[in-house]
Structure formats: C-alpha cells, structure tokens
Image (cartoon, helix red, strand yellow):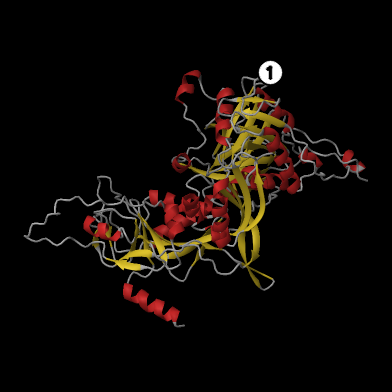
C-alpha cells in the first residue's frame, strides 16, 4: 500500500518503493568494511570533476608541504591529449586517507575520476563497476546537460546512492535554486526511486577548495567553510561502506588495465569477496568461460597518485595485480577450489564507425614537406604496414571495452566502431603520435534492423546560444532534420534549445554551428536510441578544390585561386593529384592547378614589384578534417600532417564514375 507522496522542489510526483518484506527485515546484517569508501565523481564535461579531485588530494595530505607549489593543476589528467583538450578521456583512480574530526581511525576514500563525455561511456561504466556510490557535480550556472543525464542514468541503473554537488557557486551568472530544481526533474525523468531522490546537497567552489552544506548566495563562495571538510563528511555519511559475506569464496573483478616496463600487464580490480594475497594462486575465469590457475606475482594498492606494494587486499579494496600477461577487462579472479565468475562488464552499442587503413597516398613514408624523415624532427620509425596497424587496433581492444574492430573487403583496412566521432578521433590522434600513417574514411552511423525497418542512431542535442542567433540555429538543425523538443529562456539574453537529431546529421555540424553563432554557441549531445531512417541529408553545400597534379604549392597560384574559395594549404606545401587543397565557393568540385608558377620574361613590368597579398589558409585539425569529408573523400593522417584527399585520386576516373552515377 502506497504511503503519502512527498513532492520535491521541482513540484512533480516522485516514485514510491514498496516496503521491505518481513523476511527481508529479518535477514542478518552483513559484515562491513568501515575503514573504506569507494566513490566515483561524475559530471558533464568541464563542470569541475578533476579540479575538485585535485583539492581533495591536497587537503587530505596526499602531497608533502614542499610539493604543494609544484603540483600541476588537474593532476589526474595525466594523458597528453587530456591536458591539450581539457577533458578527461580515461577513468582513473586515486586514494586519500581522510582523518575524521573526532579523532577516529583514518578512512581510505578511493576516488574514481570518470570522463564527462558520452563518447567515452565505456570508461564511465567501468568506473561505476568499482564503486558503491557517486558524487554528481553540476555547474551552478549551466545546470544539468546531456552528459549529466548520461552519467546519472548509469548510476541510477546500478541503484547507487547519489550526492549532488553544486559546483562553481562563485560564477556571476550562477542560479543555484533553479539548477537544484532542474536536477530534481532530471532524477524524476530517469525514474529514480524514493531512496535515490532523497539525496544530500553540497555547495562547492572546487577551484578554491571550499564546500558547505549551507546554500550561498548566487555568485559567491560558501562563507561558512574554509575547506572541503563538509564534502568529506557527506561522503562518509551517505556513501555506504563495502559489505561482504565472510563465508563466500574469493571474487575479484578486473575493471581496468595498465602496463609497466618491469611488471608487464597490470590488472586493476576490485575485490568483492574474500582476500587476495601476494604470491597466492587463484583461478582466472576468462571471458569465454574457461578457467586456469595463475599466481599473483605482485600486489599493489593506490595511495594518492602512486601504487605501493601490499601483502593483502580485502573486500571492497581497489588494487592492482601483476603476473597474468593476457588478462582482459571484465574477467574474474576467484578461489581455485570454488571458482565463481562475476558478470562481464557490458557497455552501450556503438553508434559511429569509420574505416581505418594503411596510408595509400603518393607521399606515404615522407615528411610534411614531401622529403624523407630524418633524425632532425622527423619520425624515423614510421609504421606504415597493414600488420602494424592491425596489431595496434588489437591492442586498443584490450583496454577499450566500447570499441569494435571488424574486417572489410580490403586486407589493409578495418571498420572501427565506437560511441562517437570524438572517441574515434582520439584513437586516430593517439596512433598518429605513435608514428602511424593512416587513411581514415568518412565517419558513418551504425544502423540496425528493427522489425524489418532500417533504424539509425539519434542524438539529443542541447544548444545554448544568444537570442539573436536562435533563428540561424533553428534553420541549421532543420536542414539536418532535427526535431525541437524543448526551448527555455532564463532571461539572461541566452536561449536553451533541445533537439532530437539523427547522429549522421551532426557529422560536420560543429564547425558550421560555431561559424553561424560567431563562436558564441555551446552545443552538447548524447545518444538517445534509434529511430526509423530519416532519409537523405545534405549537410555540406560547398564542393572541394582538388589538385590536378603533383608539385609544390606556389604563391602565384594561390593568389589566383583564393577568389574561388577557402584554401587549406600554404606556399611550399607538397601536394599530389587528388589531394583537396581548399573548399570551393560553389557546390561542385573543381580541379585546380595550385602548383602553377609565374612565367618569367626579360620584359620589365610596372607592377612587377607589387607584393601580392595572400589570404592566410584555414588550418584544419583532425576532427575538422573528418567533419569536412564527403562520401568520396578520406583523410590521410601522418605524424607531421593531416591531409584530405579523394578516395579515387585520378581525375578522369572520378569523372567517369560521376557520369555513370548521373545516367544510372
């Protein structure tokens, strides 16, 4: 029988859960590890996860006094790409020793810093499999955004308790009460039950390392606190301590992988039941169900940012083991006498795919200037063979549970499927920095058949723009067959619009979006499922300027061609036939001679000494190059350069193919 219904600040009815049965009430309590807490920090991109983890590490004494001034910001973002792009890509764990104010025994808080971008959702799901609760960070001004919905949905599906942290309360445009109400509405939309929606709220300014349980005024930092003590105490109070069965056999779940030059492959895991000891022989239950006995050669526990040797790890501990060279994510270490497997880690289906193959351009194995690489800034050990590319993709599958690699008709190319365009671009950029030369096809969506009908993935996109750009954005989304679901105006001159749009309509969207909003617009999207095929989309109206011969770009040729469109190359760049050197101002492609030199004569001209002005070329990043591609184009990626080219380099063959397509 339902109890009286309480209403959260959002004003909507919340779901009730039935009372536990008498048998459930009489179940004896399980033993609990009161000396440990496992918590994940989840949030939308750039809402302050890594910054607040930095403050937790510093205030918990993870660094010595003489180290505090030399510690970098965002110490958890150790990957070069993470620091360059300002986002978290890989889920990482750290541990702090918290000393309660009452003088009790120190408590270990294991913290998992998860990515905020839905493209790295596999990392989020891996991180959540290691913890007993989550801290949901929400920006005091922006409020819940698509990735907030994504990470929160994953936590609620696992029935984890949630602590809401309103971060960046010092922003001048903060609106704390509205953001709290929007978060309540989000919980209700995601079918949170009564226990989950009764979450505590902490107000924080992660940059200053301050938190409070008392709501500050909009645009101010919490005034009744000088540190993160209220944040730590809330975690201890509301995140449950790990429980275990004293009679259960050993069970430890592999959640991540790492490597060490001396120890080889390292498996990061959480011990669910029993104890794991250094030198112990355990049963290794593989993904295919087979079992073999292995020995734990090294056991390590995380303290701050380092791993230290340990002798034993108990229930709830997050540790690292070495000695199993082929272990994979999702597998189980168990008792040899009674091996019981834990569930494999499952992730959402991939939505975007692209073809990755060896470099087939005329400049393969040569530098950005067309010359061979040397020891002076060049890449000496280039990886250009199909075997090297395939081995690298297979290695990526070991640690990336959300990636799939499929064979194609060509022996030197493979279809790689992932969550989103950004995740695949990060993989390509990583391989480029490792010395690989690749040919990347235009990103495509992964379709599926539902009841005999073709369905494609769709995204829920949230767009924040100034009011004067609302019409341009609406028109832009209309061309991509986006459907507006919601629009709100906070009275600050900005409008928030929500669209449901096919994923393929967003390929190449962001560059045009920033152009139309003059760089002021903010757009975020998240996978929303599949819907029936939307039909043909025309997302790029302009054609390409294609080089019709090999050679070096000349300033004379650029001067004559820059009226035809926007150029991507600069004088001296080596080009080849079929390489795209610019964007045409018209809708069709144009073959151009960008290597043409000025004819020299012995006649003096009155204008001979006039300097010719060249418009600076547009430099495209890897992501922008992938967005620019059409179906008959691809991207050549080398350690020094990113070039766009036609799949078929020969102009005559392209013309014949176009004629056949036109006349059926």
Q: Nearer the viewer, residue 455 or 555?
A: 555
Task: Say above or below: 294 vs 109.
Answer: below
Element carrying mark 1: loop
Does residue 238 sit above or below 184 in this rendering?
above
Residue 572 placement (x, y as % from top left):
24, 54
Q: Nearer the viewer, residue 368 or 67?
A: 368
Q: Name the residue nearer the viewer: 334 or 117.
A: 117
Residue 148: image quadrant is top right
Query: Residue 201: x, y in percent?
Result: 71, 32
Answer left or right for 162 relative to 655. right
Look at 22% across and 52% down and name the residue there. Answer: 612
Q: Nearest the camera: 54 or 283?
A: 54
Name the residue at 25% across, 51% down.
613
Query: Which quadrant of the figure has residue 493?
Result: top right
What residue occupies the far bottom of the structure in this picture?
A: 664
Residue 444 shows up from this direction: yes
Residue 503 vertical placement versus 231 (above, below)? below
- Can I make out residue 129 in this image? no
Seen from this angle, which residue lies furthest front? 606
Name the residue carrying label 1: 101
Single out the residue that lies furthest toward the left.
602
């Amino acid at each position: 029988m339902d109890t009286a219904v309480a209403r959260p600040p959002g004003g909507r009815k919340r779901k009730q859960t039935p009372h536990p049965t008498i048998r459930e009430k009489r179940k004896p309590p399980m033993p609990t590890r009161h000396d440990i807490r496992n918590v994940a920090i989840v949030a939308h991109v750039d809402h302050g996860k890594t910054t607040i983890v930095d403050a937790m590490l510093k205030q918990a004494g993870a660094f010595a006094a003489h180290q505090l001034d030399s510690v970098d910001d965002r110490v958890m973002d150790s990957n070069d790409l993470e620091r360059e792009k300002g986002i978290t890509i890989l889920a990482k764990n750290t541990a702090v020793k918290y000393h309660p104010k009452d003088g009790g025994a120190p408590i270990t808080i294991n913290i998992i810093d998860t990515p905020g971008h839905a493209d790295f959702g596999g990392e989020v799901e891996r991180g959540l499999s290691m913890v007993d609760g989550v801290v949901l960070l929400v920006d005091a001004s922006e409020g819940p955004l698509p990735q907030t919905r994504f990470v929160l949905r994953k936590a609620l599906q696992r029935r984890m308790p949630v602590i809401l942290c309103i971060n960046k309360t010092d922003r001048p445009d903060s609106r704390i009460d509205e953001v709290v109400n929007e978060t309540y509405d989000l919980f209700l939309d995601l079918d949170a039950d009564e226990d989950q929606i009764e979450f505590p709220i902490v107000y924080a300014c992660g940059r200053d390392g301050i938190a409070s349980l008392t709501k500050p005024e909009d645009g101010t930092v919490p005034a009744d606190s000088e540190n993160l003590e209220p944040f730590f105490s809330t975690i201890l109070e509301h995140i449950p301590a790990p429980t275990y069965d004293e009679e259960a056999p050993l069970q430890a779940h592999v959640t991540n992988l790492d490597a060490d030059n001396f120890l080889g492959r390292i498996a990061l895991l959480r011990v669910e039941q029993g104890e794991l000891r250094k030198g112990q022989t355990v049963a290794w239950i593989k993904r295919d169900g087979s079992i073999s006995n292995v020995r734990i050669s090294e056991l390590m526990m995380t303290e701050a940012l380092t791993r230290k040797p340990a002798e034993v790890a108990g229930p709830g501990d997050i540790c690292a083991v070495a000695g199993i060279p082929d272990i994979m994510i999702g597998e189980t270490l168990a008792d040899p006498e009674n091996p019981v497997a834990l569930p494999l880690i499952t992730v959402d289906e991939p939505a975007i795919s692209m073809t990755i193959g060896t470099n087939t351009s005329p400049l393969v194995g040569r530098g950005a200037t067309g010359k061979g690489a040397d020891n002076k800034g060049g890449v000496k050990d280039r990886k250009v063979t199909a075997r090297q590319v395939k081995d690298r993709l297979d290695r990526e599958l070991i640690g990336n549970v959300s990636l799939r690699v499929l064979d194609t008709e060509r022996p030197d190319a493979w279809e790689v499927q992932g969550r989103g365009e950004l995740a695949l671009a990060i993989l390509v950029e990583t391989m480029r920095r490792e010395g690989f030369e690749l040919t990347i096809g235009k990103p495509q969506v992964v379709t599926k058949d539902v009841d005999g009908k073709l369905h494609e993935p769709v995204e829920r996109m949230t767009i924040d723009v100034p009011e004067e750009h609302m019409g341009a954005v609406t028109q832009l989304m209309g061309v991509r067959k986006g459907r507006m679901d919601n629009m709100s105006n906070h009275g600050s001159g900005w409008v928030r619009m929500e669209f449901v749009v096919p994923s393929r309509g967003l390929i190449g969207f962001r560059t045009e979006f920033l152009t139309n909003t003059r760089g002021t617009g903010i757009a975020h999207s998240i996978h929303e499922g599949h819907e029936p095929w939307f039909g043909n989309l025309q997302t790029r109206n302009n054609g390409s300027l294609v080089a019709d011969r090999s050679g070096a770009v000349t300033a004379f040729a650029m001067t004559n061609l820059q009226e035809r469109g926007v150029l991507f190359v600069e004088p001296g760049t080596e080009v080849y036939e079929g390489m795209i050197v610019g964007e045409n101002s018209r809708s069709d492609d144009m073959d151009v001679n960008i290597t043409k030199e000025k004819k020299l004569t012995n006649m003096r001209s009155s204008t001979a000494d006039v300097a010719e002005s060249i418009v600076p070329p547009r430099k495209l990043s890897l992501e922008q190059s992938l967005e620019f591609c059409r179906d008959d184009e691809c991207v050549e990626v080398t350690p020094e350069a990113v070039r766009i080219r036609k799949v078929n380099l020969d102009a005559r063959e392209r013309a014949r193919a176009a004629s056949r397509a036109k006349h059926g």
